[in-house]
Structures are given as C-alpha cells and as structure tokens.
Image (tube, rainbow, N blue to C red):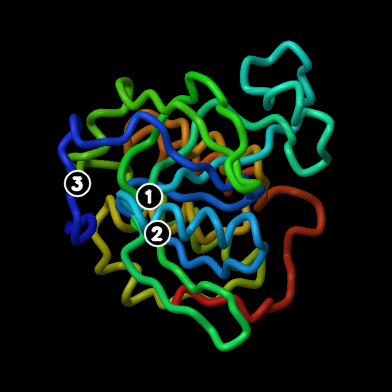
Amino acid sequence: MTRCIFDPSFNDLPDEIPVFPLSGVLLLPGGHLPLNIFEPRYLAMIDAALAGDRIIGMVQPSEEDNSNSPLQPDPRQSGLPDCPPIYETGCAGRINAFSETDDGRYLITLAGLIRFEIAAELELENGFRRVTADYQRFQGDLTSNDVAIDRDHLLETVRGYFSSQGIRGDWEAIGQTENEHLVTSLAMICPFAASEKQLLLEAMTLKERAETMTKIMEMAIHQPGADKSSSGFSTH
C-alpha cells in the first residue's frame, strides 16, 4: 500500500512539530484525513507547515485534567480554555493536498506517517501549539505490513456494528480491501468515542488494533438501544 507521495526516512522526521488537538478525530499511519481549517491560529499553523516540511501532529484532548501532567501547556498558557491537556500519543501527518476557499478557509488532506510520543510541550507560536516529538517507539509505522488478522471475525462484527449504528456499507468494496487499509479506514471513519479512538491509535500492531476494534464494536452491538435507523453515513 502506498503511504503518501513523500515517504521520509526515520532520520528525516522533525524533532519539533505543530499539533492540532481535535477530539474524536483519528489519524493513523497510512490513512488520509481531510480537514477544513478556519480558525486563525490553525490557518497560521498550516501556513507555517507549508513553509517547512508540511508535517503536523494530530492529537486528542485528554479526558482527565491532570495538573501534574508533563503535557500541560506552559504556565503562562495553561489558563486558556483552548489549551486543554492532551494525550501523550499522537500521529504525525504530511499535508499532501491543499486548497484555499474564497472565504479564506484551507481545505487540506493529511497523509498519516508515523505515531509519536510527546516529550515536551513548547511555547505557543502564533496561537497554535507545538511539541517535541519522540518517534522512537513507532519506527515500524514507516513500513507497510499487511499482516494476518482474524478477518472473518472482524467483517462479521463490522456487519453487526454497521447495522446497529444505521451505517450503510459497500460490502463488495470492503471485502476486496487489504487488511491494513481495511483496519485503518474503519478505525478512522467509525463513530467511536474519543477514548476508544485513542486506544486504537495506541495499539502497537495491526493485529492488536483489529482485535481492539472488534471488541469495541461488539460492546456497541450489545448496548441497549443499539439498533438504529439508517444515519446516511456511508463508507463510500
């Protein structure tokens, strides 16, 4: 599977990257995430990324406010309501598609490259957040490995989950999708909770991610009132 047009070596990755905290949004290595950018600080973030290596990190605000966390913003920033604590693990992506609308928004697509752990949070720059990224634990993300998973069980569970959530699926296309792309796409597009998305991000292997996602879907299927009418969501 082709990851993206630009395929950096491990040593090419930048030590400092801007981060975009967005709850419930997941970027994984090999995945593609479209984003609509309109806030001034994030417009500035995209401008800075385009002027450099085009890499930004997607992270999620953490659900617990831990004042002792090393991932708190600088004390001069911590009082800002838009600088919440963030999870320690995110995913770096490269902007591989970009356009500007007439009303000043940026429409971009991020190609997922590699996950990272946040070693430290840096000072704000033009309103957006920056971190020192440690990629060491995730070097394997730069290599595409279509490893074996329990595909039959996963697909059976996906059918039940889609039915319970009112999601329509193109089952012919799903059945023809290779394992890595299948697991990555499902993890990114399914309406999982933010904490569940984080679990999927932090799963070390494709097999572990597939197993975790299967369990999440099975729990959703068996929740009371899980059978919903069609939401109009599609995998197309």
Residue 107: assigned label: none
Task: Return the x and y of residue 28 as percentages of the image width and height.
Answer: 40, 47
Residue type pointed to by label 2: Leu
Quadrant (top left, top right, bottom left, bottom right) of the C terminus: bottom left
Q: Residue 110: which numbered mark, if any?
A: 2
Q: Earlier in the sequence, mark 3 or mark 1?
A: 1
Is the residue under label 1 in contact with that under label 2 (CB below 8 Å)? yes
Q: Quadrant of residue 17?
A: top left
Whichever of labels 3 and 2 marks the residue nearer the N terminus, that label is 2
Q: Does residue 45 appear left or right of residue 74 in this picture?
A: left
Type of amino acid under label 3: Asp
Q: Is residue 19 visible?
A: yes
Q: Residues within 10 Å of mark 1 (few under 14, many from 20)?
A: many
Residue drawn at (20%, 41%) of the image? 147
Q: Position of residue 61 (x, y in %)?
A: 68, 38
Residue visible at 65% across and 53% down in the picture = 221
* Residue 151 visible in the snapshot: no
